[in-house]
Image (cartoon, rainbow, N blue to C red):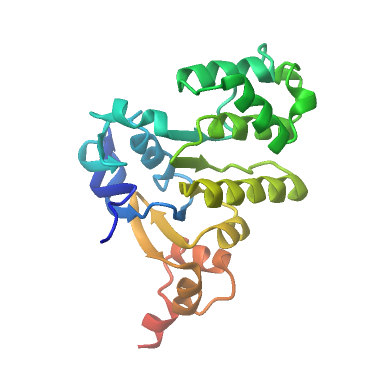
């Protein structure tokens, strides 16, 4: 018996004034899967994530997350979800520990003090717990943001450019922790990123958006074959520049 999708989106539309930021997209993500959401600036990725979180109300269409209709029933599932983005700052005056306590209490995390200690050990934050977030480096802030995103051991994790502006070593470290978390908790992950190598490494499926619509949706290996390319970055450029897949061009 097939399980219900962790995320199900059907004919989703979001219009801002006269702009169709998201234009009739549909997809379903299976529990425990990790999917890349690709697209250039203005493609609709961040708006899609915001609607999945229940922060933005769709103009039309439907969203279900863990069986709950969003945003109407978001109270049923928000404690099972989380979000991470380097573009969303945590309060700078609070220490790392204080920030994690705030979010842990919002999610009603049991044994919160122990959970913070455990996360700090996993994410190499132990020595930073009592330091103000505003005094941290970009890489350290990213690790704190990741700890915030994992504080409630979410079943659904939404990531918006989680390794942006990080050096290659720190970015690789973060990817490793995300892979480990997904496998250990069977979490469903949707990753919006411009880093094609990151998506190729982490994702078993890729959804490519352009001008609010889904232009392609497949496993990375099949996309490479269809477009006749060696890397996902080349596929992304083909889609962005309106080039037809190699198979279509050959017909």
The number of callouts visible is 0
Percent across and percent down for residue 170 are 74, 44
**Left or right of residue 157, residue 200 in this image:** right
Q: Residue at x 44, y 80 (%)?
A: 246
**Does 201 sit above or below residue 76?**
below
In depth, the one of 175 and 245 nearer the eye is 175
Outermost residue on the left side: it is 60
Asked whether residue 88 appears in the rendered view, the answer is yes
**Does 90 sit above or below residue 57?**
above
In depth, the one of 177 and 225 nearer the eye is 177
Where on the picture, by quarter, is residue 215? bottom left
In depth, the one of 207 and 215 nearer the eye is 207
Percent across and percent down for residue 243 are 43, 71
Looking at the figure, which quarter contains the C terminus?
Answer: bottom left
Outermost residue on the bottom side: it is 251
**Does 28 sit above or below residue 224?**
above
Where on the picture, by quarter, is residue 70? top left
**Left or right of residue 246, residue 145 in this image:** right
Q: Residue at x 71, y 42 (%)?
A: 166
Q: Residue at x 29, y 55 (%)?
A: 3
Looking at the figure, which quarter contains the N terminus?
Answer: bottom left
**Does 203 sit above or below residue 96?**
below
Outermost residue on the right side: it is 127
Asked whether residue 123 appears in the rendered view, the answer is no
Percent across and percent down for residue 90 are 60, 21
Percent across and percent down for residue 2 are 27, 60
Where on the picture, by quarter, is residue 249? bottom left
């Amino acid at each position: 018996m097939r399980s219900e999708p962790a995320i199900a989106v059907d004919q989703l539309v979001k219009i801002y004034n006269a702009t169709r930021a998201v234009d009739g997209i549909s997809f379903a993500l299976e529990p425990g899967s990790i999917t890349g959401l690709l697209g250039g600036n203005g493609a609709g990725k961040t708006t899609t994530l915001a609607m999945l979180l229940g922060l933005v109300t769709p103009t039309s269409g439907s969203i279900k997350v863990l069986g709950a209709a969003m945003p109407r029933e978001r109270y049923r599932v928000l404690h099972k979800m989380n979000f991470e983005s380097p573009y969303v700052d945590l309060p700078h005056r609070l220490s790392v520990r204080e920030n994690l306590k705030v979010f842990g209490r919002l999610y009603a995390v049991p044994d919160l003090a122990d959970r913070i200690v455990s996360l700090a050990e996993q994410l190499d934050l132990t020595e930073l717990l009592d330091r103000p977030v505003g005094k941290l480096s970009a890489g350290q802030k990213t690790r704190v943001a990741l700890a915030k995103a994992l504080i409630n051991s979410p079943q659904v994790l939404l990531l918006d450019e989680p390794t942006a502006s990080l050096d290659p070593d720190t970015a690789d470290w973060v990817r490793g922790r995300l892979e480990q978390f997904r496998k250990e908790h069977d979490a469903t992950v949707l990753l919006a990123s411009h880093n094609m190598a990151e998506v190729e490494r982490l994702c078993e499926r890729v959804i490519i958006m352009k001008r609010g619509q889904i232009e392609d949706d497949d496993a990375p290996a099949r996309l490479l074959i269809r477009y006749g390319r060696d890397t996902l970055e080349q596929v992304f450029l083909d889609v962005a520049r309106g080039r037809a897949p190699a198979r279509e061009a050959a017909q």
